[in-house]
């Protein structure tokens, strides 16, 4: 086991009856990183998170967590905490009482000051003595994170931690996770939100039908190696359209309303061709007031990798050597 790895999985398989949830999954997660899991519903994300938390064991393959090989009778190495399918709470108890009960079940015996600290970290101090039956989904998610933090984990595993959070709550949780990673805690989280992955993760693994179709740095996934649609708002839409029509490698994709009601030009291009168009606009004295992808590069890559294919093997980008290989 590489001492710099918090998680190493090789050829992990997991079936539920005739359903193959994970099919030869490889995964490497470095210590002190925030690693994202993405994929369509049913791709195997929650199953994989459950294996990391010790809620189930793999049918095949090798799994090592925090330097500990995981066998068939997995009790889980110390230092792993988190939740899948949302945190389990006692609705008749207050937030503080929920954390105290959980600590007692773990045999943790967390002191009140430690519970207060966990509540403060997730921004729930003001509602610490409120019953959780009245909590919103976002508040329940934050309390689940507080419960996970009680264990002072070295590996934190979270299933859709931003689910139900308002913008302020999401910013708060993002800050907590970023600080934990900076202090050396490894975080593995799943999310359907590409903006969460872009904001938090240094690396991401994308699953489709139980197989890894990409695993690597976020920048590598979102690299400019595929054509994307971009919206441009300029000071002279008519001239900008003519220049775009003549620019090599640039295809006109349509027009939309820009911010403030101005006309926006939509073009499809690779990044180098888009850069050349911007230079042409500037040389022509046309001001570029807005430029951005219609769909983020990460979301575009996600869709390209996970949309069903009618024929041919799916390309798979695996960890380690980052090599391209055909999915079995």
Image (cartoon, rainbow, N blue to C red):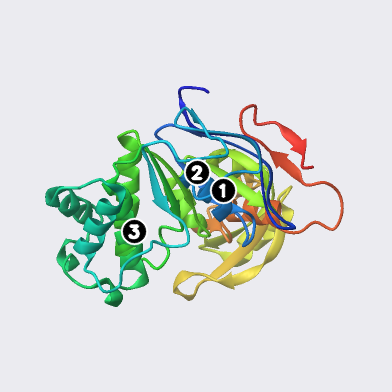
Q: Name the side, left or right, on which 263 lies relative to 186.
A: right
Find the distance from the CA under tag 1 to the CA under tag 3.
19 Å
Disc nearer the start of the sequence (2/3): 2
Give the residue at x 56% y 60%: 232
- Disc 3 is placed on an element classified as helix
Residue 311's place in the image compared with 67, above or below, is: below
Give the residue at x 82% y 46%: 313
Could you tell me if the residues under marks 1 and 2 are in contact, i.e. CB atoms within 8 Å?
yes
Question: What residue is shown with label 1?
Answer: 48
Question: What residue is shown with label 2?
Answer: 52
Along the line of sight, the residue nearer the viewer: 316 or 186? 186
Question: What residue is shown with label 3?
Answer: 144
Along the line of sight, the residue nearer the viewer: 245 or 6? 6
Residue lying farthest front? Answer: 73
Residue 273's place in the image compared with 86, above or below, is: above
Residue lying farthest right? Answer: 311
Q: Name the side, left or right, on which 308 lies relative to 60.
A: right
Q: x%, y% of residue 104?
A: 25, 52
Classify mark 1: residues with Cα within 10 Å, few (<14), some (14-19) or many (20+): many
- Disc 1 is placed on an element classified as helix
């Amino acid at each position: 086991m590489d001492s710099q790895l918090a998680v190493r999985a090789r050829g992990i398989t997991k079936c539920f009856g005739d359903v193959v949830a994970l099919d030869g999954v490889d995964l490497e997660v470095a210590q002190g990183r925030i690693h994202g899991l993405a994929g369509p519903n049913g791709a195997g994300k929650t199953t994989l998170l459950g294996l990391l938390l010790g809620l189930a064991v793999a049918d095949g393959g090798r799994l090592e967590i925090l330097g500990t090989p995981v066998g068939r009778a997995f009790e889980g190495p110390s230092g792993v905490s988190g939740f899948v399918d949302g945190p389990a709470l006692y609705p008749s108890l207050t937030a503080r009482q929920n954390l105290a009960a959980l600590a007692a079940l773990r045999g943790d015996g967390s002191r009140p000051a430690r519970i207060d600290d966990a509540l403060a970290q997730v921004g729930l101090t003001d509602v610490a003595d409120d019953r959780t039956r009245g909590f919103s989904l976002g508040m329940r998610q934050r309390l689940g994170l507080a419960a996970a933090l009680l264990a002072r984990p070295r590996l934190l595993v979270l299933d859709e931690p931003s689910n139900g959070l308002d913008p302020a709550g999401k910013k708060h949780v993002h800050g907590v996770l970023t600080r934990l990673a900076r202090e050396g805690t490894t975080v593995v989280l799943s999310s359907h939100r590409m903006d969460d992955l872009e904001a938090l993760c240094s690396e991401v693994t994308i699953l489709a039908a139980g197989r890894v179709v990409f695993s690597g740095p976020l920048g590598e996934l979102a690299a400019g190696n595929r054509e994307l649609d971009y919206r441009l708002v300029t000071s002279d839409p008519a001239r900008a359209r003519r220049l775009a029509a003549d620019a090599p490698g640039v295809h006109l994709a349509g027009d939309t309303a820009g911010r403030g009601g101005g006309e926006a030009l939509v073009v499809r291009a690779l990044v180098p061709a888009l850069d050349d168009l911007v230079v042409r606009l500037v040389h022509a004295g046309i001001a570029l007031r807005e430029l951005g992808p219609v769909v983020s590069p990460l979301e575009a890559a996600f869709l390209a990798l996970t949309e069903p294919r009618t024929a041919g093997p799916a390309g798979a980008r695996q960890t380690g050597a980052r090599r391209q290989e055909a999915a079995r």
